[in-house]
Amino acid sequence: MFDRNLVDIDVLIEEINAVLPQIQCRQCGFAGCKPYAVAITKGLADINQCPPGDEEGVQKLAKIMGVKPKSLNIFYGMSKPRLIAQIDEQICIGCTFCIQACPVDAIIGATKQMHTVISLECTGCELCIAPCPIDCITMIPPKKEINNMQHDPYRVNHTSSLGTNVEKKKAADYAKKRYEFRLQRMNHTKID
Ligand code: SF4
Ligand code: SF4
Ligand code: SF4
């Protein structure tokens, strides 16, 4: 049985967070990958609640936590191929709700102006869909040329067996940085 007293809890949280896919979709029931990692260490979440991580992710978490491997709990959702958000710019009313919802700052636009998704930054979390009052955001497969671009951190499919583990890790690390940057920016805004 895993004895969490034997390890530094912060190190453990980082170790768990490092194997999470960093989609920041909240399907696990927490406000992002790191909060889920924290919840696991506190015994508030099980290791099989992350659909984008799929079975492979659950096995990694089992290894880190020193517990028996188990199957993904489909109550939290199923693994699926990565899609990215696209805004119908002709009908967008510029309300900014989608910008506020995006965990990795992948949407640009200003109040009452057209909004656009930066495809290379979108993790496909789908958090921008529900807040849009006119349903002008849809999820679409990433364009082939985007997937093939060498500098594209998301040229792998986050959630399927496509792409090497190295590519998946690269994409996750990039999304993690953008998520952390956004949190920092929001904290600064609160203080200022
Ligand atoms: S990818 Fe989504 S479901 Fe998985 S840990 Fe991160 S926020 Fe939770
Ligand atoms: S644009 Fe939408 S789907 Fe893409 S990361 Fe932002 S909130 Fe998620
Ligand atoms: S939530 Fe919808 S209408 Fe509002 S800015 Fe975003 S895309 Fe445009």
Image (cartoon, helix red, strand yellow):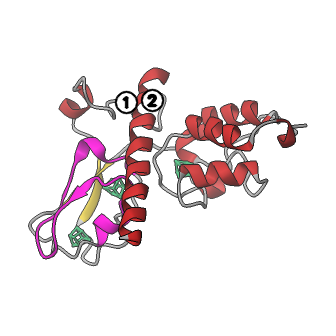
Seen in the picture, residue 38 relative to 191 is either above or below; the reply is above
Type of amino acid under label 1: Val
Q: Amino acid at mark 2?
A: Lys
What residue would you read off at disc 1?
156
- Specify whether residue 64 is painted magenta: no
What separation in Å lies between label 1 and label 2 (alpha carbons)? 6 Å
Across and down, in percent, residue 68 comes to 82, 35
Q: Is residue 103 above or below residue 150?
A: below
Pointer 1 with pointer 2, Cβ within 8 A: yes
- The image quadrant of residue 92 is bottom left
Which numbered disc flags the more N-terminal residue, 1 or 2? 1
Image quarter of the N terminus: top right
Residue 171 place in picture, x, y as percent = 40, 34
Q: Residues within 10 Å of mark 2 (few under 14, many from 20)?
A: many
Question: Which one is nearer the viewer's eye here, 22 or 180?
Answer: 180
**Could you tell me which secondary element the residue under label 1 belongs to?**
loop
Q: Quadrant of residue 27?
A: bottom right
Query: Where does the image place residue 80, in percent across and percent down from the top left?
Result: 47, 44
- Residue 94: x percent and y percent? 17, 73
- Residue 164 visible, this orientation: no
Q: Residue at x 30, y 67 (%)?
A: 98
The residue at the far front in this view is 192
Q: Residue at x 60, y 48 (%)?
A: 50
Residue under label 2, please give it.
168
* Magenta highlight range: 97-124
The answer to whether residue 186 is above or below residue 17 is below
